[in-house]
Image (cartoon, rainbow, N blue to C red):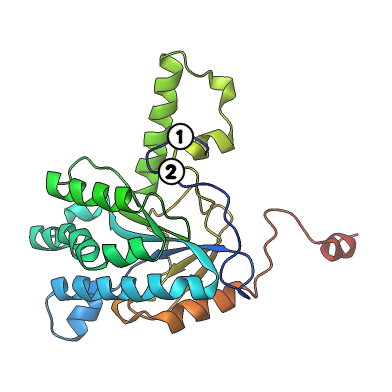
């Protein structure tokens, strides 16, 4: 286990469900709750609650699509600027999700890890998060990472501070820092980088999500609001991903020969 961080899962991931090919790490920006509610003349809070149901459907469907790692973006460090009533509803979502689904996650072999800063969260919410992580810590069939009070830039800064502290305490030297060593200091340390990042709702931006980890991820944008998201949308995104040729900065032999 690299890095030795709290709740850190093993980095090696075996194949997904039978016939599904190599296990995938899929990351999703859960976007469109507010617009979903507005189109129906409903309060934004009901859109967020509907989004929780979409998360349940997606987590249940993911293993059947060969996904073993699922990272979802629930609340960003920038979301604190939203109206107080909406922030309060967003803060209640982890409780709503884990109270209704934690027993199933635990029973079905799902390991939960919540990424992001705990500062600013209520003591009750931190307790709920820690219980979810502790009760599922022994599971290894499927890994669910929930980015909550998370920002990619903030996480990189936090990782840099951790390394600076290690240097200050004589536990590390500056020349020992490599890309791999730095990755282990991130909130996602120990997890493989995402293969595929999905953004529903029609928006086409990353929004400060997994900035370091997504360096070579493929992106799929879908015109469906998150509360309407279901297994068929996840399946379509993965099918599109499977048509991509991933080069990781290199080139295939035919391209090299064609260039002379």
Residue 96 position within the rendered picture, expressed as x and y whole percent measured from the top left? 18, 65
Q: Indicate the secondary structure of the residue bearing disc 2.
A: loop
Q: In the depicted view, which residue is nearer to us: 186 or 221? A: 186
Above or below, 84 relative to 51: above
Distance (Cα) linking label 2 and label 1: 7 Å
Image position, residue 132 (x, y; %): 28, 53
Q: Nearer the viewer, residue 187 or 84?
A: 187
Camera-side residue: 258 or 122? 122
Q: Quadrant of residue 241?
A: bottom right
Please state if 259 lies on the left or on the right of 246 as rendered: right
| Residue 150 visible within the image | no
Residue pictured at 51% horizontal, 40% vertical: 183
Q: Is residue 232 visible?
A: yes
Which residue bears the numbered disc 2?
A: 8
Q: Residues within 10 Å of mark 2 (few under 14, many from 20)?
A: some
**Helix, strand or loop under label 1:** loop
- Residue at x 18%, y 59% (from the top left corner): 95
Q: Residue 195: horizontal and vertical position, in percent?
A: 56, 61
Query: Within the image, what quadrant is residue 30 found in?
Result: bottom left
Q: Residue at x 32, y 72 (%)?
A: 56
Is 82 on the left or on the right of 190, as rendered? left
In this view, the residue farthest toward the bottom is: 40
The 10 Å Cα crowd at callout 1, few under 14, some 14 to 19, many 20 or more, is few
Residue 94: where, in percent of width, then height?
A: 22, 59
Q: Nearer the viewer, residue 236 or 251?
A: 236
Left/right placement of residue 219 relative to residue 34 reads: right
Q: Quick check: marks 2 and 1 in contact, CB under 8 Å?
A: yes
What residue would you read off at disc 1?
4
State the count of labels: 2
Residue depicted at x 47% and y 42%: 189
């Amino acid at each position: 286990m690299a890095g030795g961080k709290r709740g850190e899962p093993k980095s090696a991931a075996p194949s997904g469900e039978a016939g599904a090919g190599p296990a995938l790490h899929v990351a999703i920006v859960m976007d469109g709750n507010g617009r979903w509610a507005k189109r129906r003349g409903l309060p934004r809070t009901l859109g967020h609650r509907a989004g929780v149901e979409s998360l349940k459907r997606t987590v249940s469907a993911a293993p059947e699509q060969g996904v073993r790692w699922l990272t979802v973006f629930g609340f960003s460090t920038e979301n604190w600027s939203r109206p107080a009533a909406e922030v309060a509803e967003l803060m209640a979502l982890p409780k709503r999700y884990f109270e209704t689904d934690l027993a199933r996650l635990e029973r079905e072999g799902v390991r939960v890890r919540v990424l992001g800063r705990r500062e600013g969260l209520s003591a009750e919410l931190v307790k709920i998060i820690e219980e979810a992580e502790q009760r599922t810590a022994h599971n290894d069939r499927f890994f669910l990472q929930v980015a909550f009070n998370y920002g990619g830039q903030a996480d990189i800064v936090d990782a840099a501070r951790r390394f600076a502290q290690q240097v200050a305490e004589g536990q590390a030297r500056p020349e020992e820092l490599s890309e791999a060593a730095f990755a282990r200091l991130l909130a996602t340390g120990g997890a493989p980088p995402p293969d595929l990042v999905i953004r529903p709702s029609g928006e086409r931006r990353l929004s400060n999500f997994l900035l370091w980890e997504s360096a070579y991820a493929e992106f799929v944008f879908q015109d469906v609001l998150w509360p309407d998201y279901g297994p068929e949308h996840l399946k379509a995104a993965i099918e599109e991903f499977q048509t991509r040729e991933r080069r990781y900065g290199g080139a295939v032999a035919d391209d090299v020969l064609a260039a002379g």
